[in-house]
Amino acid sequence: MNKLESISKSLASTSRKNGPNIKIGDLYFKPNTNPKSDFGIKTINIHLNLPPSQLYEYALSEKNTFITSSGALSTQSGIKTGRSPKDKRVVYDKETKDIWWDSTSPNIKMDHETFKINRETSICYLNNLDNLFVFDGYAGWDKQYRIKVRVICERAYHALFMHNMLIRPTKQELEDFGDPDYTIYNSGTFPCNRFTGNMTSSTSVDFDFTRKEIVILGTQYAGEMKKGIFTVMHYLMPKQNILSLHSSANESDNGDVTIFFGLSGTGKTTLSSDPKRKLIGDDEHCWTLDGVFNIEGGCYAKCIDLTREKEPEIWDAIKFGSLLENVIVDSERNVDFKDSTITENTRASFPIYHNINAKIPCIGSHPKNIILLTCDAFGVLPPVSKLDNKQVMYYFISGYTSKVAGTEEGVEEPEATFSACFGEAFIVWHPIKYAEMLSEKIEEHDCNIWLINTGWIGGSYGNASRCPLKYTRQIINSIHDGSLNNVEYDTLPKFNLQFPKKCTNVPDILNPRNLWENKNNYDNQLQKLAEMFIINFKKYDCPDLEPYGPQI
């Protein structure tokens, strides 16, 4: 047994309360350090796999951290309140030479030497701290495909976040955990050296798939760790012919599974949290030869404007052990979910078992229905359309939604947003790889595919309102009970989308053009959005699929 193994074994049997007092360099990093130097004799309190109660105690010593009236922990992520996709880098080597590298890719090249410089910066910073928090967990509920992840971080809040978001090992699994498959070195409170090659800011989130490591510098936003592991799974799973999905999933009592794709703000988390169905997961899944499994052990929900009336499952899940990021808390420790003073991107992280309808283990059968969610602020897409197998590849690669252009006075023009595979920032291979795998799965299992617009109806943003949630839920109920398979359909011009003429308990809102007072304005907006789709799709170089999108 070598020294690393010996120390790792001693860690497993060390009291959770205090943790060992040893050099972290010896434990994890194996640096060539002169043991007679001050650095060589530095000792660090390593807090390994602490329960939430103890992580609370450490986190509460930080500024702007509170226990809220619901029992959740509220904290702040510093200047960065969202991900930094332009600072994400991937080491280019023989392992990654065939991934998606062109100018439209989210993958920014980094060489091994630059990665090692950032890694050394991170390690030197961590080695000079008095306290470190370490969490060991799994990504993937299917034991055949799961990976072991070790998170090393400075902030107790980051350890609590990953305690929620990864799958928590049993006591026996922790004792047998051994070496991790992937390690995250989170030095987010310390910046990268901006003069290091190819650095564009003080933030850098770096992936080395050969070393199986992620280094985080210059951002304390916890979501970087969650999406970092998702990026790893997007790399690993397709190599095993497993489809990784940026989706939520739920299941009926008789085992029928539905997958929901969608970008932020489209309703992916809200619509998968259905009191009549079991939640498999709210964000990240894989589709294997046997069915689907959740990658994560928890949920990460946007909570701006959260109310118990609208989203009771999420509201009730925010209790002791949950984590609230960047929310405003009053003197009585009540959360004002309407307050976006810090950011619109307020978040709640909680273990999936906090959701009363969670299915544990988070594994399901092959999907019966696949739903692509979009929030169309142009107000031209139908509330629901049925897609064929070629159309789903086109709209899956397009990954369309829209957002309001800004909050400046007089700005009312919606802005189209396209994100390949409904999660372009996290995919590693070219979008066509994921799309072809999805198409093959759909054909093999005879899935029904739907495009649902949760956005504006009767006009565009600023002139109308979003489709009421109760109608969207009823449309999904009709998908689940099969009634939408037995009605007449009409065709949306230019997009060639088939939409139903009727839906049970839904008023006459299914034909979007009929709801516009000025039909010429509708036609112009439809033309404008179609042109945006066509221009965007060109960058993916998939000419065989272009006929299945909008035609002008």
Image (spheres, grey):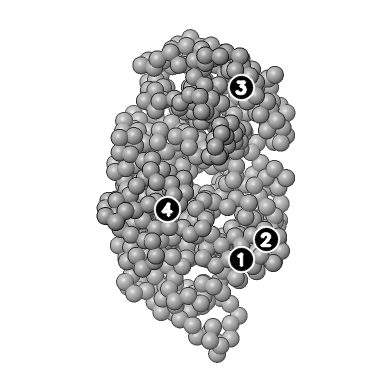
Q: Residues within 10 Å of mark 4 (few under 14, many from 20)?
A: many
| Mark 2 or 1, nearer chain start | 1
Nearest the viewer among 378 and 141 is 378
In this figure, which residue is indicated by the disc labeled 2? 199
Q: In what element is the residue under mark 4?
A: loop
Q: Residues within 10 Å of mark 1 (few under 14, many from 20)?
A: many
Q: In what element is the residue under mark 3?
A: helix
In this figure, which residue is indicated by the disc labeled 3? 525
**Gap between marks 4 and 1 measured at Cα:** 24 Å
Q: Is residue 361 in view? A: no
Nearest the viewer among 429 and 180 is 429
Amino acid residing under circle 1: Cys
**Gap between marks 2 and 1 measured at Cα:** 8 Å
What residue is at 31 percent from the left and 71 percent from the top?
17
Amino acid residing under circle 2: Met
In this figure, which residue is indicated by the disc labeled 1? 192
Pointers 2 and 1 in contact (C-beta within 8 Å):
yes
**Gap between marks 2 and 3 measured at Cα:** 40 Å
- Seen in the image, is 116 located left or right of residue 147? right
Residue 251 numbered tag: none
Q: In what element is the residue under mark 2?
A: loop
Amino acid residing under circle 3: Gln
Residue 326 numbered tag: 4
Q: x, y (%) of residue 482?
A: 41, 19
Closest to the camera, between mark 1 and mark 3, is 3
Q: x, y (%) of residue 491?
A: 57, 13
